[in-house]
């Protein structure tokens, strides 16, 4: 149910509360910055459209807004925290006011929910005594602000508005990726990529490629916007080309794997659009690599030092398999200078948090995937959740650290939200 359909008294209560929060924020800012003048309107929009706003910032709006405003690292962190936590707070408020907290009960049966909570607690417990406590504290901070919020967002949206809330969240996620992809092409900053890998938004190209690849996947497998099939394939092709130009081999491999997984029959039907997307992406990739100086190493079979990092992480894990070396400790153990993590979620969890961390990370990734695969009745939403999990899982296995792989927590949250919605439907006899 959208907020526009709520009774007038109900809406007025929300608007008054949002106006009070917005006015307080503007008053505290004391109009020190020009943007604070718009703070009230922005907060009101974030309140009434909390699922869409949270999805937008998770899907790429954070990077786009923070970097175009040149906020710097500290400003970007405050934007990160505010843009994620304020909509989440609004979702919690809706949950309480609508008396829908009982819909969260099926979440207790989702192993991925316990795994997400357990990993956060384990990171906190293993922080004392870390070989690199500063980096460990930073990881924990971003885990709470990014990973846990990414998991909770689709869960809370579904708890409040059922599947309509999940669709609203995914629509925001899609629009965030669309805005990021549009900026990539319209800004023409990609022309400087051969000379500066951080030319686009001054941001890690693999991180950008991961988000743009996520948008490509949503464009093909999702139904967030009423776009015709050819337009959705065109958007996916534009996003795929951006991934290639960013030389993001990991997200590209993950995108192909997810789309192939999406070709599996859903409800007895073969999904040709996913197969067409794989073909078009491969053709675009070969064309770019063959005709331009961009991404000269995109098709290279080199491991970029990954195997050395994997071996070092495995060796360190075997030395202390029970408890691990401590949160963030791999930064002090890495065989390569400047490398902070082994670029593999499971090895990172194992080397820093031991067998408990490895077990929880495996639960987070594979229990929702197994549940989706073994379902005898697959809806369109489940046909989206499966490829989404595969995409985020492959990314997590070959690039990034735990906070950087927050999309895996997002995909687990989507799977948990679908489980909750199905349980609620059974309870209501729908």
Image (cartoon, rainbow, N blue to C red):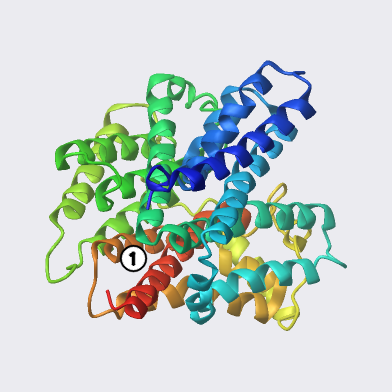
Evaluate whether residue 325 shows in this view: yes
Seen in the picture, residue 196 relative to 84 is either above or below; the reply is: above
Seen in the picture, residue 413 relative to 68 is either above or below; the reply is: below
Seen in the picture, residue 269 relative to 272 is either above or below; the reply is: below
* Residue nearer the viewer, 13 or 23: 13
Report x, y in % for residue 140: 73, 58
Q: Residue furthest top?
A: 34
**Residue identifier under label 1:** 386
Seen in the picture, residue 24 relative to 100 is either above or below; the reply is: above
The residue at the point 70 percent across, 28 percent down is 72
Report x, y in % for residue 118: 66, 74
Evaluate whether residue 300 shows in this view: no
- Quarter of the rendering occupied by the C terminus: bottom left
* Residue nearer the viewer, 92 or 65: 92
Report x, y in % for residue 122: 72, 72
Helix, strand, or loop for circle 1? Answer: helix
How many residues crowd around disc 1 within 10 Å: few (fewer than 14), some, or many (20 or more)?
A: many
**Number of residue marks:** 1
Q: Residue furthest right?
A: 129
To which quarter of the image does residue 33 belong? top right
The residue at the point 83 percent across, 64 percent down is 130
The residue at the point 75 percent across, 64 percent down is 327
Q: Residue furthest front?
A: 9
To which quarter of the image does residue 406 belong? bottom right
Report x, y in % for residue 338: 71, 47
The residue at the point 47 percent across, 56 percent down is 157
Left or right for 71, reference 104:
right
Left or right for 32, reference 171:
right
Left or right for 223, reference 408:
left
């Amino acid at each position: 149910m959208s907020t526009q359909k709520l009774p007038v008294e109900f809406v007025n209560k929300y608007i008054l509360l949002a106006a009070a929060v917005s006015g307080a924020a503007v008053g505290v800012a004391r109009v020190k910055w020009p943007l604070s003048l718009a703070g009230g309107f922005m907060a009101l929009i974030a309140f009434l459209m909390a699922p869409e706003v949270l999805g937008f910032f998770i899907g790429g709006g954070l990077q786009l807004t923070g970097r175009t405003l040149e906020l710097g690292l500290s400003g970007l962190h405050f934007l990160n925290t505010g843009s994620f936590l304020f909509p989440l707070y609004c979702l919690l408020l809706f949950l309480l006011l609508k008396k829908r907290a009982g819909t969260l009960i099926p979440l207790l049966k989702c192993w991925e929910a316990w795994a997400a909570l357990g990993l956060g607690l384990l990171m906190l417990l293993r922080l004392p005594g870390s070989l690199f406590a500063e980096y460990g504290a930073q990881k924990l901070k971003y885990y709470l602000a990014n990973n846990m919020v990414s998991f909770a967002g689709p869960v809370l949206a579904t708890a409040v508005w059922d599947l309509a809330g999940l669709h609203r969240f995914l629509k925001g996620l899609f629009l965030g990726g669309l805005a990021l992809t549009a900026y990539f092409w319209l800004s023409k900053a990609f022309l400087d990529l051969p000379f500066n890998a951080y030319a686009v938004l001054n941001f890690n190209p693999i991180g950008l490629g991961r988000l743009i690849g996520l948008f490509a996947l949503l464009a093909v497998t999702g139904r967030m916007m009423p776009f015709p099939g050819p337009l959705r394939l065109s958007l996916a092709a534009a996003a795929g080309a951006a991934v290639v130009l960013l030389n993001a081999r990991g997200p590209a491999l993950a995108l192909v794997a997810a789309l192939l997984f999406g070709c599996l029959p859903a409800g007895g039907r073969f999904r040709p659009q996913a197969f067409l997307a794989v073909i078009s992406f491969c053709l675009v990739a070969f064309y770019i690599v063959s005709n331009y100086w961009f991404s000269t190493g995109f098709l290279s079979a080199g491991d970029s030092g990954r195997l050395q990092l994997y071996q070092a992480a495995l060796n360190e894990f075997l030395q202390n398999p029970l408890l691990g070396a401590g949160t963030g400790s791999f930064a002090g153990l890495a065989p390569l200078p400047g490398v902070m993590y082994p670029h593999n979620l499971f090895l990172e969890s194992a080397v820093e948090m031991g067998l408990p961390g490895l077990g929880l990370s495996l639960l987070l990734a594979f229990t929702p995937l197994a549940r989706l695969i073994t379902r005898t009745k697959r809806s369109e939403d489940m046909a989206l959740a499966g490829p989404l999990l595969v995409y985020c899982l492959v990314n997590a296995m070959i690039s990034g650290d735990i906070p950087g792989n927050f999309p895996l927590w997002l995909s687990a949250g989507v799977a948990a939200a679908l489980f909750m919605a199905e349980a609620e439907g059974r309870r209501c006899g729908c």
